[in-house]
Structure formats: C-alpha cells, structure tokens
C-alpha cells in the first residue's frame, strides 16, 4: 500500500523565478500541463495498492502543485515546510490545515529555520538523508531529526539547478540513483561509501530529472528516461514507467515533486 498527496494544477504556472529553470522564461502550456498532471495522477492511481489523495489548489500559489514541498510525514507526524522564498510561504497554512483535518499531529519548526519538506528529506533503507544549502538549512535538518526521532545524514548541494535533494537523489531498491555533480566532495564521498553499487546518472540525464522519480517498490515513474538509463534500471530489476512532465520541468520539478508520500 502506498498513499500519495497531489494538488491539481488549476493555478499552476511560472509566475516568478526562484530557481534557474524558472528563470529561462519558457511559457507554460496550461492545457498540456493539466494533461500531464492528470496522466501522472491516473498512472499512479491505477497501480494496485496505490491511493492518491488530493488537496484543493489555491489561486496565487502556482507552486502548490509541488506537494513534495508541503512538509515531511512520518507515521502520524507531519512537519510543515518553512519555505525559503516568500513566493511559496503562503502554501504552508493550507498544507497544515489539510494534515490537521486528516488526523495528523503537526509539529511546527522554529521561524527562520528554512526547510522544504520531502523535497530535501528522503529515506533509503533505514537511513534518512537531508539536502541543504539552497532551500533547507542544516540547523533545520537537525530539528527535524529530533522531532522525527531519526538520524538524518546531511548532504550539501552545490549546483543550483539541483536545489532540492529530490532533484538529484532517489532510492533504487537498497541502493541509490544520484547525480554526482550535484553534491560537494564530502557528501559525494558519503554517498559513494554508503552505496558502492549505486547508479550514477549523467548530467544530460540529470537535467531531464532522472532522479526526480516516484518510486513504488520496483517501479520508477519518471519523465522520459534515456535509453541508457532504462536499460541500466532494467538490469537492476526496475520497471520504468515513463511520463511526460515537460511543463512542470519549466518550473524546476518533475513527477516526484508533484507527489508527497503519506505513509
Ligand atoms: N518551482 C518550485 C520551486 O522552485 C519547484 C519545486 C520542485 N519541488 C521539488 N520537490 N524538487 O520551489
């Protein structure tokens, strides 16, 4: 059983610039974005054992579609994000409300400590990894670690195109898929030690958001993977389910960013 939270793209668009993808100024095709979001939704909802919950979108909050940044969930605990950019700060009250109404215990982080939820915090095996620098603060990861009662290994991001951890790292069974160029030397050493058999993606694959994958057991739901990557993943027993996320990549997010794992 896997449960996800998604937010329909009713008010989605690139209306400000808070990452290099948005700064390219490519116009979003609204109809195509709706279709792509619906395809992703239907693809996930059709997988046996998968349930997709929805939150109502809000006018003036175009990035609310990226529910991975709502916060982080562990059991019945929800820790809402403290968004770094004022443009996204308005989302928090709506996410908090949704989680309270759905029976979660909400623990709020101290003001001034930035944290962007599952965008910067993910679990591989028994270990939680936290990305910091562009969006989340290392001090915030320390507080999150205390609240969750879990150790969090911090990873320092260094390439602004990969400003959230989930743009450059994901779980691959008991190992990992990541883009080495996104991490500083120390963090890369940590990943390589920890996951000697990881799959490293090329820059070309990384900018197609290869690591921004919805992982459901041995299935990867991701934006058009390269032939090389599909073949490499197939050798590892992973089935790729390609989706087209072109309109969301214009805002700096792909399939994983559009979902938040609830269980
Ligand atoms: N435009 C959004 C932002 O810059 C995209 C968020 C992508 N989300 C993610 N989990 N990587 O905040």
Image (tube, helix red, strand yellow):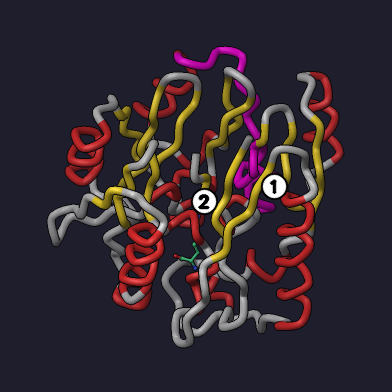
Local crowd size for mark 1, using a 10 Å CA cut-off: few (<14), some (14–19), many (≥20): few
Residue 135 drawn at (x, y percent): 33, 56
In the displayed structure, 75 sits above or below 243; it is above
The quarter in which the N terminus is drawn is top right
Identify the residue at horizontal 80%, vertical 49% (top origin). 46
Whichever of callouts 1 and 2 sits on the residue coming sooner in the sequence is 1
User: Residue 197: within the magenta?
Assistant: yes
From the image, state whether disc 1 or disc 2 is nearer to you. Answer: 2
- Residue 102 in the image: above or below residue 75: below
The residue lying at 47 percent from left, 81 percent from top is 58
Question: Would you name the residue on which mark 2 appears?
Answer: 260
Question: Is residue 179 left or right of 237 when viewed as pictured?
Answer: left
Residue 57 at what x, y percent from top left?
52, 76
Instruction: Identify the mark at residue 196; answer none if there is no mark.
Output: none
The answer to which of 206 and 88 lies nearer the viewer is 88
Closer to the camera in the image, 210 or 95? 95
| Left-right relation of 93 to 16 | left
Residue 7: percent from the left, percent from the top? 56, 67
The residue range painted magenta reads 194-215
Q: Quadrant of residue 230?
A: top right
Q: Give the total number of marks visible in the rendering.
A: 2
Residue linked to disc 1:
204
Q: Secondary structure at mark 2?
A: strand
């Amino acid at each position: 059983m896997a449960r996800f939270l998604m937010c329909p793209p009713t008010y989605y668009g690139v209306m400000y610039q808070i990452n290099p993808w948005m700064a390219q100024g490519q116009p979003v095709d609204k109809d195509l974005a709706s279709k792509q979001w619906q395809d992703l939704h239907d693809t996930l909802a059709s997988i046996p054992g998968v349930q997709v919950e929805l939150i109502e979108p809000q006018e003036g909050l175009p990035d609310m579609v990226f529910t991975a940044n709502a916060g982080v969930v562990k059991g019945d605990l929800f820790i809402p994000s403290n968004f770094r950019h004022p443009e996204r700060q308005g989302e928090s009250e709506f996410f908090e409300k949704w989680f309270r109404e759905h029976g979660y215990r909400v623990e709020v982080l101290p003001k001034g400590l930035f944290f962007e939820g599952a965008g910067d915090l993910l679990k591989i095996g028994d270990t939680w990894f936290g990305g910091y620098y562009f969006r989340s603060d290392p001090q915030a990861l320390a507080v999150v670690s205390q609240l969750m009662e879990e150790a969090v290994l911090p990873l320092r991001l260094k390439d602004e195109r990969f400003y959230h951890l989930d743009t450059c790292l994901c779980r691959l069974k008991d190992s990992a898929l990541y883009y080495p160029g996104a991490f500083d030397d120390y963090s890369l050493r940590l990943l390589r030690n920890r996951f000697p058999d990881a799959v490293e993606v090329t820059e070309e694959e990384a900018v197609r958001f290869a690591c921004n994958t919805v992982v459901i057991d041995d299935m990867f739901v991701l934006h058009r993977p390269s032939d090389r990557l599909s073949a490499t993943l197939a050798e590892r027993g992973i089935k790729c389910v390609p989706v087209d996320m072109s309109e969301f990549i214009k805002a700096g997010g792909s399939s994983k960013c559009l979902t938040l794992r609830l269980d």
